Image: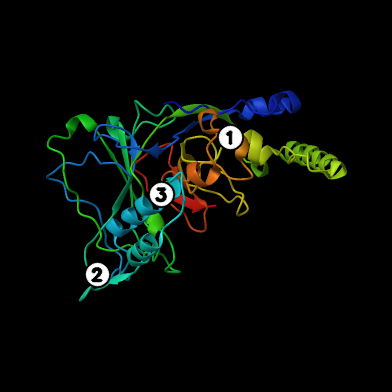
Amino acid sequence: MTRTTPPRPLDVEALFPELAAFRGTTTRLHPRPGRPELSASSVGGPMLWPADEPWPMCGEVHGRGRGRRPADIRRYRQVLASAWSREEAPGPTDEERELLGELHREHRIPGASDTDPLPLIGLAQLYRRDVPDLPKGPGGCDLLQVFWCPFDAHGPGRYDLALHLRWRRSCEVGEALNEPPQPQVVGADGFVPEPCVLHPEQVITYPFAGLLPEDLCARIDAWEEVLEEEAEQKADESATEPLGYQYDLSIPPGWRVGGFASWHATDPYPMDCLTCATPMHLLLTIDSSEWDGGSGSWKPLEDQNLPTHRGATPTEVTVGRWGELNVFACPNDPEHPHRWSIQ
């Protein structure tokens, strides 16, 4: 089934014609639980990885001997989903609650050290043939594979993510690895993605307001203030939330490729390549939810009757405190190190 973004509530370029010069596109990935094949773009699905190539590992020194087991996390999700999908007496039974409590326990790996080999988790793989806004990889690579460490214990503050991106030519992969290594335990369940098939959809997008010319940004702010005042004057139960440039007209929520990054949690800051100082482009957004209360206008038409608690978090991936991870790439050389920010 395809996923279709509803038309925007209004034509923002009719209100602010200058935005036409900044118009771009982004590909919403619309991941949904399924059984993706090895040759398909996916989130949390099998990775097309050569059997004779070492699986990526985290080499940083940090704790990795205590956490939840990936198999327990997946089983926990299955039990809970099944309990709440029952038509009669939905919700966990006493027996299921006991099982859920057991599955939620943390485990310690005896004898584990902070330097033991730690397999990264395959987060997503994207083929250029499936994703219109995925840029060309180095040397004609057509497949982007994304991994991360299942512990947020990196960087100077020892609380950052560790992300690993790999470009490859899919046609050059001979025998594929059938059973990749996986960590015995993970730091949080949000590091373990549910296998999802993708329904890519290219949509129009515009830059974050704070990065637009100052006069244009000021006019957008003034327009939003008028809408907010009108909504406050109505002050009745029939009143709806006023439209907003950020949440309704510019940058869609959810997993997506290309377009513009949102800076709603921090002030925008330069994201330049650390190798050549070129301003980097947004490559991929990894989001904790497909939509929320503030971005419901982007909810796909096919999901309109689906409650938010059942449909907005298909991947079960959580970034920080329910935020989004924006990954940037150098437009001059995709092999230059990537950078990212969490919003």
Q: Is residue 273 visible?
A: no
Q: Which mark is residue 81?
A: 3
Q: Earlier in the sequence, mark 1 or mark 2?
A: 2
* Residue at the spot 49% in from the left edge and 44% down from the top edge: 310
- Label 2 SS: loop
Which mark's residue is nearer the viewer, 2 or 3? 3
Q: Amino acid at mark 2?
A: Thr
Q: Is 201 above or below relative to 232? A: above
What's the amino acid at mark 1? Trp
User: Could you tell me which quadrant the N terminus lies in?
Assistant: top left
Q: What's the amino acid at mark 3?
A: Ala
Horizontally, is 238 left or right of 154 in the view?
A: right
Q: What residue is disc 2 on?
A: 115
Q: Say which label, 3 or 1, has the lower sequence index.
A: 3
How far apart, in angstroms, are the residues tagged by discs 1 and 2?
44 Å
The residue located at (23%, 32%) in the rendering is 170
Coordinates of residue 197 in the picture (x, y in percent): 36, 35
Instruction: Tell me residue 17's x, y (percent).
Output: 72, 25
- Here the colouring is rainbow
| Camera-side residue of 120 and 261 | 120
Q: Which mark is residue 298?
A: 1
Q: Quadrant of residue 19?
A: top right
Which callout, 2 or 3, points at the residue further toward the start of the chain?
3
Q: Could you tell me residue 270's position as x and y percent? A: 55, 49
Q: CA distance from mark 3 to mark 1?
A: 24 Å
User: x%, y% of residue 243?
Assistant: 72, 37
Using residue 76 as the reference point, say whether residue 50 is left or right of it.
Answer: left
Which callout, 3 or 1, points to the residue nearer the camera?
3
Cα distance, mark 2 to mark 3?
36 Å
